[in-house]
Image: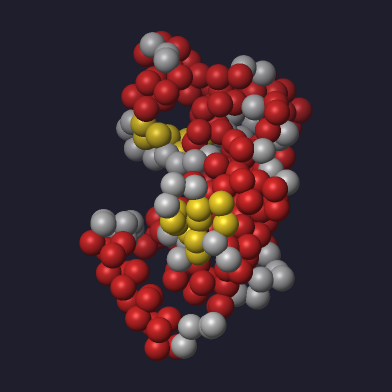
Amino acid sequence: MAMSYEDKEQRRQEWYERVKKEGKLKRDPKEEHDAKLKTLQNPVRRNIIKSLYQKKMTFDELTAELNLESMPLKLHLGMLEDILFIEKDGESSYVITPRGEDYLDAADTNTEPKDDLKKRWQEWHDKAQSEGKLKENPTEDHKAGLKAMQNPTRRHIVESLGEGKMTFDDVKEKFDLNDMQARLNLDMLVDTLYIEKEDDSTYVLTPRGEAFLENVDPKHL
């Protein structure tokens, strides 16, 4: 039986109070907006929200329905959990949250946020260009990117940053690298604009890095 409006409002209020108490609503508003935009640009993640809007699903059910391998599905689910659109219900099941429901209720789910994505990409491109980070020769830029991505460690760093920001020490620990190895790989990814520094020690994915993850075959990561 469908929930009444009053029951939905009570559930929503209880959920917001719980996540606030758990410290999950402390993100800066601009950072929150950027995180949502980055996450929802991907049609697979929008489809996950739609599927969970219909019913609770396990990891294996989502794998079968979306025809995805485990690694990319984990990445998509992690990003949706980070922006609080879905959450785990038990060890292996996922449910949509009131925030996810609000998104679907408010959005035209048959259209993609193309204008916002185009604007975000253009702002990043203009910023990189004004800072002199874009190579004047597109062929040279393409070759540099290919060279950087020949190394599996760098591909895996980009993949990990697709799940969220990481510090220098996080990268060292996760990939078992010494200082020199971590610096070399991170610097090359920064130089080719797949990642960028958020502050002195934290790295985040750029729109170019996001595009790489969107288009690469997971088997090649």
- The residue sitting at 55% across, 42% down in the picture is 74
Q: How many callouts does the rendering have?
A: 0
- The residue sitting at 37% across, 27% down in the picture is 170
- Most extreme residue toward the front, as rendered? 1
Residue 56, image x and y in percent? 54, 62
Quadrant in the picture for residue 32: bottom left
- Residue 43 vertical placement versus 137 (above, below): below
Quadrant in the picture for residue 11: bottom left
Residue 83 in sight: no
- Residue 110 vertical placement versus 198 (above, below): below
For the N terminus, the quadrant is: bottom right
- 129 to the left or right of 214: left
Closer to us: 163 or 168: 163
For the C terminus, the quadrant is: top right
Closer to us: 45 or 117: 45
- The residue sitting at 67% across, 18% down in the picture is 150
Quadrant in the picture for residue 159: top right
- Most extreme residue toward the right, as rendered? 139
